[in-house]
Image (tube, rainbow, N blue to C red):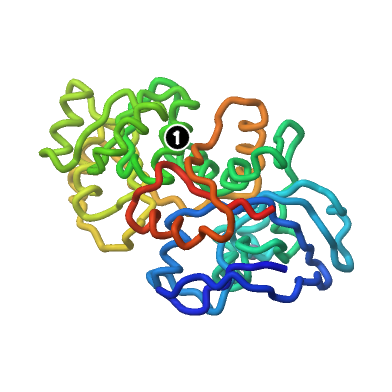
Amino acid sequence: MRALVLEAANEPFRLTDVPDPTPGPGEAVARVFACGAGLTIQHIKAGRSPAALPRIIGHEIAGEIAEVGAGVADLKFGDPVTAYYYLFCGHCRPCLSGYEPLCQNLAGQIGKVCDGGYAEYIKLPARNFIKLPEGLDHRTHPAEIGVIADALATPYKVLRRGRVRRGDVVAVFGAGGGLGIHQLLMAKWAGARIIAVDIARDKFDACRSAGADEVVDASAGDVAEALAELTRGRGLDVAIDYVSSSATLGAAVKALGPLGRLVTLAGAGQDARIPLSMLRQSEKEVLASRYVSRAEVIDVLEIVARGEVWPVVTDIRPMEEAEELHALLEESKVTGRAALRIA
Ligand SMILES: [Zn+2]
């Protein structure tokens, strides 16, 4: 099969022929139609996120089952599928409780410890494939459908984590990023009033199109003050922080109103200082969110199948242009998600 192989960090992909994968017991192989390209995998390519190289990266796939291994009863040839990103065990307590990202036997992620979707075929444990519901045309729109399991499902889970209700005032920090734009879409879907916060002025129009009622330029002054003004002193019900630097976390906590919830996705992985008195005085909460459950992926696939939300994929390229696409990702020049069309 043709595959894009990343042999070393910061090196160009090598588009080459590699042996077709064959499924072992409990595994399945899918033909890949498209694979999403976002910062998560650009971090691997740029060496900022560790992966066992050489590797075929990519995890946001849409495709069809091509072959199943022994003992796989719930998938068959031709089933349209997407992939669940984490390699979970399926039998520990967190897995059985629907918290697969907290799996006690977590083996890693697709495209980091095993080969991913930048190839014509992908082999995974059968439990990592999720069948697509009726109503999703994966042959016509494989790029959009491929990114649902991460780019849309992650924001959906964040809404649940932050207990966002209709009418809540929600601010999204890093709203112009690939996940941020999709967070705006999902917050709109949930009926929130939305304030987008970012420093990338070139993404502000996209933020508005995705559902932001207001946009705050974080480079233009005190963000917490701007948020206080926009909420007329009431404060935010929920702050969602995709940047999670000390500065954004500090501003987010300050901008929360009574009983407000901050959800951090801890992108930068830094330590942060948050005054506990500020939390206690008005019973604010700081919550963290890590990927999604399989059930949440299914929920979001159905939301898209019903036509309630549609992912923002603005740049779809053939495998031959993966290098150019990743250069754009590195320079933050992609709005929403990009994707490779494989078949
Ligand atoms: Zn587990």
Q: Is 319 placed above or below 80 here?
A: below
What is the count of numbered marks?
A: 1
Report x, y in % for residue 163: 45, 35
Residue shown at the point (51%, 60%) measured from the top left: 322
Q: Is 274 placed above or below 306 here?
A: below
Report x, y in % for residue 108: 56, 69
Residue shown at the point (34%, 39%) measured from the top left: 261
Secondary-structure class at tag 1: loop
Q: Picture quarter containing residue 211?
A: top left
Q: Picture quarter containing residue 125?
A: bottom right
Q: Is 194 placed above or below 299 here?
A: above
Q: Is residue 343 visible?
A: yes
Report x, y in % for residue 51: 50, 74
In this rendering, would 128 be left or right of 65?
left
Report x, y in % for residue 80: 77, 46
Residue shown at the point (34%, 40%) measured from the top left: 175
The residue type indicated by label 1 comes to Arg
Nearer the observer, 298 or 343: 343
Nearer the observer, 13 or 245: 13
Look at mark 1 in the image and give the residue it sits on.
163
In this rendering, would 147 be left or right of 67?
left
